[in-house]
Image (tube, grey):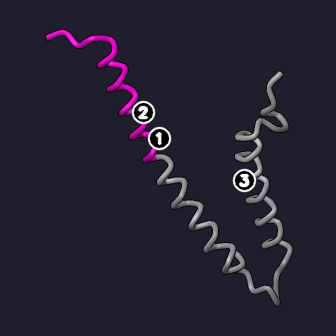
Amino acid sequence: MRVDRAERAAVTQQRSLEAFLAAKAAFDAQMAELQAMSAEHFGADPEAVLWGEAASLADWTRRLREVTDAYHRRSEFAHG
């Protein structure tokens, strides 16, 4: 039985959609974790924050900025 090009394209698109939705669900779960971490001040006592905790949060923020910069094609991710 021969599968035509349109049918193969439809199967490929469906599999791509399934993979995208699975990745999005994982991303959304991570975002929910980040929101919970933020609400809990990333485990730091706001009355007794030390430089190490501030540095860790600054590093995590830098890493998240890389993701948003890549999405928005800013900074080193800009094209052209």
- The residue lying furthest to the left in this view is 1
Disc 3 target residue: 64
Which class describes the residues within 10 Å of circle 1: few (<14), some (14-19), or many (20+)?
Answer: few
CB contact under 8 Å: marks 3 and 2: no
Image depth: mark 3 or mark 1 in front: 1
Q: Nearer the viewer, mark 3 or mark 2?
A: 2
Q: Nearer the viewer, residue 56 or 42?
A: 42
The amino acid on which the numbered mark 2 sits, given as a three-letter code, is Ser
Q: Secondary structure at mark 3?
A: helix
| Magenta region | 1-22
Q: Are marks 1 and 2 in contact (CB under 8 Å)?
A: yes
Question: Does 12 appear in magenta?
Answer: yes
56 or 71, which lies in front?
71
The secondary structure type at the circle numbered 2 is helix
Name the quadrant containing residue 74: top right
Q: Nearer the viewer, residue 58 or 14?
A: 14
**Circle nearer the N terminus (3, 1):** 1
Q: Which residue is mark 2?
A: 16
